[in-house]
Image (cartoon, rainbow, N blue to C red):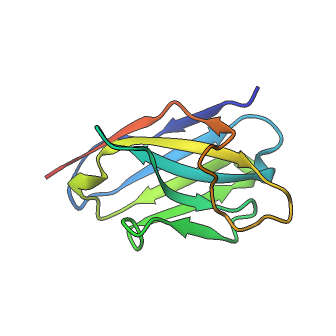
Amino acid sequence: QVQVVESGGGLVQAGGSLRLSCVVSGRAFGAYTMGWFRQAPGKDREVVASISQSGGNTYYDDSVKGRFTISRDNAKNTVYLQMSSLKPEDTAVYYCAAAQREPFDTRGTMPSRPDYWGQGTQVTVSS
């Protein structure tokens, strides 16, 4: 069974930085498109960033472009989300997700229902 485990959340002041990490069990990590979602209280879960199987293609929501960077290390089965210039509106539970993709699908975009989810990690940005 595939396990997805996030870490790195916490409390940070506005303008600060955090790095989230996500480790995926199993041997198929290199075949997954990986993504980070977030859900703030009272709001729907939304995709923040995603990355293709090899890391060659990435997607960012407009709200985080220029501030967040997604990357992956396939040798370590790990995907990262470097968050800088954090704002109070970035406060949410952040979820890591993995989506099985055909080898030819290297767009780096996430489906609305990924195959595997982590348990989430809280990020709180104080003003």
Residue 43 picture location, percent across and down: 33, 43
How many labels sit on residues?
0
The extreme right residue here reads: 103
Residue 78 picture location, percent across and down: 64, 47
Relative placement, left or right, of 119 versus 41 is right
Residue 125 picture location, percent across and down: 24, 48
Relative placement, left or right, of 92 versus 33 is left
Q: For this rendering, which residue is in front, 12 or 112?
A: 112
**Residue displayed at 79% across by 35% down:** 26
The extreme top residue here reads: 1
Residue 4 picture location, percent across and down: 63, 34
Q: For this rendering, which residue is in front, 81 or 104?
A: 104
**Residue displayed at 80% across by 52% down:** 31
In the picture shown, does residue 93 fall above or below 83?
above
Relative placement, left or right, of 73 versus 21 is right
| Image quarter of residue 124 | top left
**Residue displayed at 29% across by 65% down:** 85
